[in-house]
Image (cartoon, coloured by chain):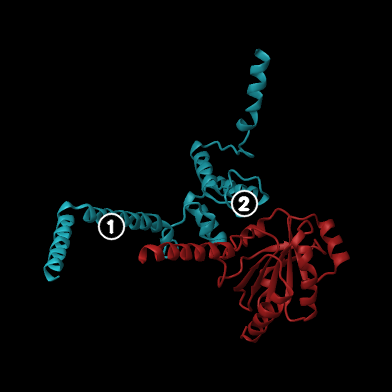
Chain colours: A cyan, B red
Amino acid sequence: MKRGLLIFCLLFLPLAAHAIDARQFADPKQQEAYDTLTAQLRCLVCQNQTIADSNAELAADLRRQVYEMLAKGQSKEEIIQFMTDRYGDFVLYKPPFTAKTGLLWLGPAGFLLLGLLGVFWVIRQKKAAADPASGQAEKLAKIRRLLDEGDAS
Amino acid sequence: MLKYILPLILFIVMAVFLAIGLNLKPNDIPSPLLDKPAPSFTAPKLQAPQEKLSTSDLKGQVWLFNVWASWCVSCRAEHPVLNGLAQHKAVTLIGLNYKDDPAAAQGWLGSLGNPYTISIMDQDGRIGLDWGVYGVPETFVMDKKGIVRYKHTGPVTVDDVQQIFLPLIAKLQAEAP
């Protein structure tokens, strides 16, 4: 039993060790800045990973750069500026709102609005069709027409 | 009637978007360096490590900056194209030997030919980072004022040389320094 438990725990060891070359800062504020920055910057080689997650060499270089800049006392904004100057907005997982990224930010809300309008339109159509008043009027008109036709013959 | 046409229209719209999506190259990230001054560097030359080359030495010349490495497979495909380009003698071709072992790099140039006017070493990738390099090979074109005028990601092909690089170089050479 004990042995089984040990093996079970060992299975999860890789999960605990996932942080790649974690760097230590004396100042907890810098540590916090380092952790948020590396979680916000995209690794450009493996584009769906942050530089904190990625094992690519480029990601390691970028982490080193972030570390060195923080150690020099540079602010988060300066580091983000440094990265976008070189790699463009693409390096940010959260791109700034500009004319170019407007569609990206507003697109989902736009599609939601479009969908809601569609739903309202369909409901109104269905309602109109199911409306007993309009149905009756139609029937009455048909009866009148049939009667008129009957009179004519 | 609309009932029958609407799905068709939706299908066509979707097909168009998917077709565009299929033809996108997510690896081509536009460089923010375009039309900006080239990032400066001072780095040891690969074939004479005691000598250094700086961006300021290249002022007044049109130059190409090609990022390469002996471990890079696409660079091997690109290499004969660069050798061909060098034969035109139209431009100064600077190589950035990126995160490479100098001995391996020199062996590469020895066996495959050396198209570069000068290659510089960037063993820890810092110059590459300054230039926003994220994949090798990459090629930049600088004008006489040291402004980045073009960036090519991935291996340069013979067609690229004929259709993009040579015309651009001719145009930049004609500009006043």
Percent position (x, y) of residue B145? 61, 77
- For the residues labelled 2 and 1, the Cα–Cα distance comes to 44 Å
Dot 1: few (<14), some (14–19), or many (≥20) neighbours within 10 Å? few
Percent position (x, y) of residue A105? 41, 57
Q: Chain of mark 2?
A: A
Percent position (x, y) of residue A82? 54, 57
Q: Is A87 positioned to the left or the right of B86 in the image?
A: left
Dot 2: few (<14), some (14–19), or many (≥20) neighbours within 10 Å? some
Give, as a three-letter code, the residue at label 2: Cys
Question: Mark number for residue B52?
Answer: none
> In front: A138, or B91?
A138
Element marked by disc 1 = helix
Question: Which residue is the site of mark 2?
Answer: A46
Give, as a three-letter code, the residue at label 1: Trp
> Looking at the rendering, which quadrant does residue B112 occupy?
bottom right
* Figure check: A25 above or below A100: above
Do the residues at pointers 2 and 1 share their chain? yes
> In front: B158, or B11?
B11
* Figure check: A107 above or below B85: above
Labels 2 and 1: the sequence-earlier one: 2
Q: Is A19 positioned to the left or the right of A146 in the image?
A: right
Question: Which residue is the site of mark 1?
Answer: A121
